[in-house]
Image (cartoon, rainbow, N blue to C red):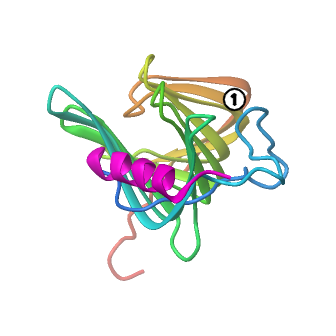
């Protein structure tokens, strides 16, 4: 068990990094991730309610995360964020564009700054493209999002379904891995008097 002083040092470091609140993420049901999901006997070094974390580079924001609850696992270098009432909210920035994502849980790797999202993940780009899946990874180094799970992508009457996706952070370029189906809905204007 860590001392209160060590917990205070961890919390002070997080406040210095812009953290407002934290929570524990044990992974979405049915989606275990080795090395990320906390074992039942492991306990966090610190737990914080209502957390906000930000990552920036040279004054430019890269991402922001907000959650009801957060737990810090110092020895593993992760923060696990969990929904209590509100979904975990993640905003990934790319210049003036952004991708806003909601999920049940998220894991922040404090070394790589990568994010893993679990449970009813739904995203919308600032340009209006939407997608949903059950788990999603954002690679800070590659500046891309990816999933191996089924995915549904929607924009202006177009719906694409597939399994597995890799995309840039604002969904301008994406690859859907397999089987892809597309549904196009044409809007019809109703004539006056009908």
Kind of element beneath mark 1: strand
Residue farthest toward the bottom in the current orientation of the protein: 193
Q: In the orientation shown, which residue stands out farthest toward the left?
A: 59
Left or right of 76 on screen, residue 54 = left
The reply to whether residue 156 is visible in this rendering is: no
Q: Magenta includes 69?
A: no
Front-most of 172 and 122? 122
Q: Is 70 displayed left or right of 65 in the figure?
A: right
| Segment tinted magenta in the rendering | 1-17
Residue 125 picture location, percent across and down: 37, 44
Residue 150 position (above or below residue 12): above
Image coords of residue 3 (percent x, y)? 56, 54
Rendered view: 68 above or below 38: below
Q: Residue at x 55, y 77 (%)?
A: 85
Q: Residues within 10 Å of mark 1 (few under 14, many from 20)?
A: some
Q: Main secondary structure of the magenta part?
A: helix
Q: What residue is drawn where x is 76% and y is 50%?
A: 42
- Is 50 rendered above or below residue 120? below
Whole-percent x, y for residue 157 in the image: 48, 50
Examine the rendering and report whether any part of residue 160 can be seen: yes
Q: Is residue 167 above or below residue 120?
A: above
Give the residue at x 37% y 34%: 170
The front one of 2 and 76 is 2
- Residue 104 falls in image quadrant: bottom right
Image side of residue 58 versus residue 8, left or right: left
Q: Circle 1 is placed at which residue position?
A: 164
């Amino acid at each position: 068990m860590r001392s209160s002083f060590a917990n205070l040092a961890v919390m002070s470091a997080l406040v210095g990094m812009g953290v407002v609140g934290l929570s524990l993420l044990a992974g979405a049901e049915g989606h275990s991730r080795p090395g990320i999901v906390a074992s039942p006997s492991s306990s966090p070094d610190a737990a914080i309610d209502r957390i906000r974390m930000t990552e920036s580079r040279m004054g430019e924001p890269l991402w922001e995360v907000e959650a009801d609850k957060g737990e810090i696992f110092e020895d593993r270098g992760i923060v696990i964020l969990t929904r209590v009432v509100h979904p975990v909210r993640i905003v990934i920035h790319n210049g003036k564009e952004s991708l806003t994502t909601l999920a049940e849980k998220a894991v922040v790797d404090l070394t790589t700054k990568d994010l893993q999202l679990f449970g009813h993940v739904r995203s919308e780009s600032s340009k209006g493209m939407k997608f949903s899946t059950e788990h999603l990874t954002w690679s800070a180094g590659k500046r891309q999002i990816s999933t191996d799970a089924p995915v549904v992508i929607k924009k202006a009457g177009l719906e694409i379904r597939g399994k597995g996706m890799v995309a840039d952070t604002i969904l301008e370029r994406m690859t859907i891995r397999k089987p892809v189906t597309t549904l196009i809905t044409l809007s019809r204007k109703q004539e006056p008097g009908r």
